[in-house]
């Protein structure tokens, strides 16, 4: 069985990290599986949005595989590490939803933050416990978490290694919705299908514009947004979306 399983629901691509015996800890095989599947869905014109979730009952992803990394040297990490490859998840253009079904710790919390939307089950738990292992986060935990929830909460989590539950994560701004465990996939698929049903150029530039807000000044970001807004008037989808509103009917987007 593949460590990253893929399936589709209409125009949504679903990836399940499937190492439940290790709480879906990320080894090199998982990195390859995730990156290949996300890039393949990104390139597949039938797919409009993706979901990443964890296999089994307990975990989304409990971090990088500690057993696989415990004996590695600095030179090994620096020269041969596949770990850098994971950041390719942040370079795809179609939105990715993290459907967090349980522990999202260390690299698991960081993978959720590489996604564009985080929907959590009431049982989800988030944390950056690396300090307890004698290290610090390495896939963005000190940077993305600080931007997502602010310095006070990020410092608390990164320095104490404590976990926060789904409610605290939502209050803090890390999670966009919390749902009962049994509704998690249904909710994530519904959100992904809604996204996939919109005009794809608009969806892709919306993602790009929101992400730009993390990287740039307000003035530059506003300019970037305005240019993208104008650019969408070159698409058939803009004509169709606005005509459909005026004619009081559902739009039929062509993704052109
Ligand atoms: C390898 C892991 C693992 C991990 C769990 N397991 N997390 N194996 N790497 N990150 C394994 C356990 O060893 C155990 O295997 C099985 O999964 C079940 O886990 P238990 O600990 O028995 O479950 P439980 O008591 O319920 O505790 C759950 C837990 C705990 C609180 C989530 O497993 C835990 O603290 N895991 C480590 C979380 C962590 O520190 N993550 C950060 C990793 S560093 P056996 O064989 O004993 O049954 C990281 C850096 C990222 O992510 C940056 C890289 C660049």
Image: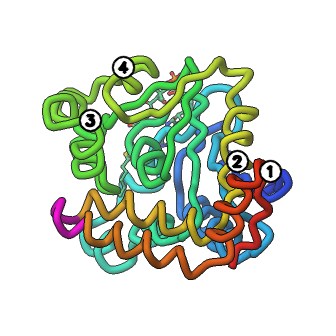
Residue, disc 3? 149
Answer with mark 1 or mark 4, whichever residue precedes in sequence.
4
- The Cα atoms of the two marked residues, 3 and 1, are separated by 40 Å
Which residue sits furthest front?
A: 246
SS of the residue at dot 4?
A: helix
Q: Residue 31 or 224: which is nearer the viewer?
A: 224
- The Cα atoms of the two marked residues, 4 and 3, are separated by 10 Å
Residue 177 picture location, percent across and down:
52, 28
**Residue mark closest to the camera, 2 vs 4:** 2
Magenta-highlighted residues: 216-221
Q: Is residue 90 left or right of residue 53?
A: left
User: Could you say which disc has been placed on residue 194 in the image?
Assistant: 2
- The Cα atoms of the two marked residues, 2 and 4, are separated by 27 Å
Q: Mark 3 and mark 4 in contact (Cβ < 8 Å)?
A: no
Colour setup of the view: rainbow
SS of the residue at dot 3?
A: helix
Pointer 2 residue Cβ closer than 8 Å to ligand 1: no
Q: Residue 14 or 249: which is nearer the viewer?
A: 249
Pointer 4 residue Cβ closer than 8 Å to ligand 1: no
Q: In what quadrant of the picture does the N terminus appear?
A: bottom right
Residue 16 picture location, percent across and down:
70, 48
> Is disc 1 surrounded by few (<14), some (14 to 19) or many (20+) residues within 10 Å?
few
Answer with mark 2 or mark 4, whichever residue precedes in sequence.
4
- Mainly helix, strand or loop, the magenta region? helix
SS of the residue at dot 2?
A: helix
**Residue mark closest to the camera, 1 vs 2:** 1
């Amino acid at each position: 069985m593949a460590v990253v399983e893929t399936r589709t629901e209409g125009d949504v691509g679903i990836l399940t990290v499937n190492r439940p015996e290790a709480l879906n800890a990320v080894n090199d095989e998982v990195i390859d599986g995730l990156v290949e599947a996300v890039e393949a869905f990104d390139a597949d014109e039938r797919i409009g949005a993706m979901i990443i979730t964890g296999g089994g009952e307990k975990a989304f992803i409990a971090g990088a595989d500690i057993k696989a990394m415990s004996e590695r040297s600095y030179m090994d990490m620096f020269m041969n590490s596949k770990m850098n490859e994971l950041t390719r998840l942040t370079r795809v253009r179609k939105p990715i939803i993290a459907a967090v079904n349980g522990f999202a710790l260390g690299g698991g919390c960081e993978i959720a933050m590489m996604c564009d939307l985080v929907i959590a089950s009431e049982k989800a738990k988030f944390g950056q416990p690396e300090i307890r292992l004698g290290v610090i986060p390495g896939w963005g935990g000190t940077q993305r978490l600080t931007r997502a929830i602010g310095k006070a909460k990020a410092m608390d989590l990164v320095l104490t290694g404590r976990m926060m539950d789904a409610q605290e994560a939502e209050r803090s701004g890390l999670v966009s919705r919390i749902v009962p465990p049994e509704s998690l996939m249904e909710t994530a698929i519904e959100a992904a299908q809604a996204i996939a049903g919109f005009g794809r150029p608009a969806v892709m530039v919306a993602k790009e514009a929101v992400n730009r807000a993390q990287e740039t000044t307000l003035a530059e970001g506003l300019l970037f947004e305005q240019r993208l807004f104008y650019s969408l008037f070159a698409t058939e989808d803009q004509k169709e979306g606005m005509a459909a509103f005026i004619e009081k009917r559902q739009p039929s987007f062509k993704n052109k």
